[in-house]
Image (cartoon, grey):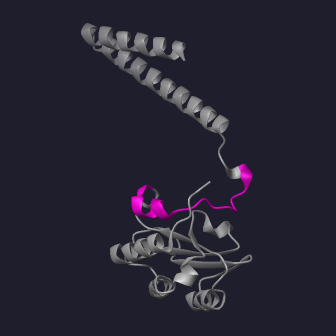
Amino acid sequence: MQTPISVNEKKIFIQWFLNQYQLKKRESVWILNYLINHDDILEHIHFVREAKLCPRSIIISSECSKEVPFRFYKNHIVTTDAEKSFHDIRLNREEDLFIEVHFKNDRQNAMYVSVLEENPFIPKEHTITPQDEQVANDILRFVLYEYKMKRIKELIDKALDERNSSEFLRLSQELSKLEAMQSQT
């Protein structure tokens, strides 16, 4: 179970975001500033990924993002009109609103991650199970092994063509180590 994000933490993030990034749509700045000044609304704000899957959500992007500038989703209706979303926020203060922001390196940003919540509207079949993760890791290890094997064999062929015995011996040992490591897994 995730700990709820406080109104103050959301305010700090929004202020930081507004100070750090130029937004693609100026109305996005107005909406975020409005939220900062209304604690009762901020209580119902949730920062999530994949906000488009939520019944009521906004996607906001900075200039440094390749994502859409602004989207407002409400019950399968999508609009780029920020004024409509502003009025909806103002009139439905106690309704949950999910927000996704896009900016450079947003996936690795500690400030953003600190306010992110799990999106309850992501279908269960889209979640990764530990078994899925293990299979993906196994595939990745195998593909990496195959690539390294191919590369070393190419370098061995090159060393043979150039009659470079020391490089041939070094690469042969590397190949043997790689094969031994693969047989242990």
Residue 58 visible in this rendered orientation of the protein? yes
State which quadrant residue 17 falls in: bottom left
Q: Is residue 184 above or below residue 32?
A: above
- Residue segment shown in magenta: 108-125
Judge by depth and name the residue closer to the eye, 166 or 66: 66
**Quadrant showing the N terminus:** bottom right
Residue at 65% in and 76% down: 96
Residue at 49% in and 29% down: 144
Judge by depth and name the residue closer to the eye, 1 or 113: 1
Judge by depth and name the residue closer to the eye, 113 or 20: 113
Is residue 126 covered in magenta? no
Location of residue 35 in the rendering, given as x and y in whole percent from the top left corner: 50, 83
Location of residue 154 in the rendering, given as x and y in whole percent from the top left corner: 40, 21
Location of residue 73 in the rendering, given as x and y in whole percent from the top left corner: 66, 77
**Quadrant showing the C terminus:** top right
Location of residue 79 in the rendering, given as x and y in whole percent from the top left corner: 64, 83
Residue 63 visible in this rendered orientation of the protein? no
Number of marks present in the image shown: 0
Residue at 42% in and 18% down: 153
Q: Is residue 4 above or below residue 95?
A: above
State which quadrant residue 58 falls in: bottom right
Judge by depth and name the residue closer to the eye, 32 or 78: 32
**In the figure, is residue 54 to the left or right of 176?**
right
**In the figure, is residue 179 to the left or right of 164?**
right
